[in-house]
């Protein structure tokens, strides 16, 4: 398949349904609460490379959930997860 046939334009995308947007908002709030916890752990625990994994996962979780909550659509790198309006 060519790249043109694989891409979906913005007007073809269906917005994320409201229950999933509410769940995404809850996940976003949880990711905001994780930030002080990560800072606390970074200063109180012995240094471990695992802290970088926690930071990256928290950042991605917060970014994706905030994008879905605010815009109603997944970020561009996750558009393959979206359903199309016409059921493509």
Image (cartoon, grey):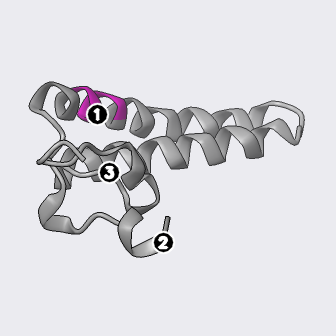
Which residue is disc 2 drawn over?
Answer: 2
| Residue designated by label 1 | 24
**Label 1 to label 2, Cα distance in Å?**
33 Å
Q: Single out the mark in the foreground, 1 or 2.
A: 2
Q: Residues within 10 Å of mark 1 (few under 14, many from 20)?
A: many
User: SS at mark 1?
Assistant: helix
Where does residue 2 sit, x and y in percent of width and height?
48, 71
Please indicate whether residue 2 sits to the left or right of residue 47 in the image.
Answer: left
Residue at 89% across, 38% down = 48
Question: Which one is nearer the viewer's eye here, 4 or 54?
Answer: 4
Secondary structure state at the residue bearing disc 3: loop
**Of marks 2 and 3, which one's residue comes earlier in the chain?**
2
Classify residue 72 as left or right of residue 79: left
Q: Classify 24 as above or below 70.
A: above
Give the x, y percent position of residue 4: 39, 75
| Overall secondary structure of the magenta section | helix
Q: Earlier in the sequence, mark 1 or mark 2?
A: 2
On screen, residue 16 above or below 1: above
Question: Is label 2 in a helix, a strand or a loop?
Answer: loop
Dot label at residue 74: 3
Which contiguous range is marked in magenta? 23-27
């Amino acid at each position: 398949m060519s790249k043109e046939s694989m891409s979906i334009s913005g007007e073809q995308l269906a917005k994320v349904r409201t229950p999933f947007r509410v769940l995404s908002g809850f996940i976003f709030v949880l990711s905001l609460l994780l930030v002080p916890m990560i800072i606390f752990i970074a200063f109180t625990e012995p240094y471990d490379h695992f802290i970088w994994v926690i930071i990256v996962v928290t950042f991605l979780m917060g970014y994706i959930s905030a994008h879905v909550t605010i815009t109603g659509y997944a970020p561009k790198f996750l558009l393959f997860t979206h359903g199309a309006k016409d059921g493509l």
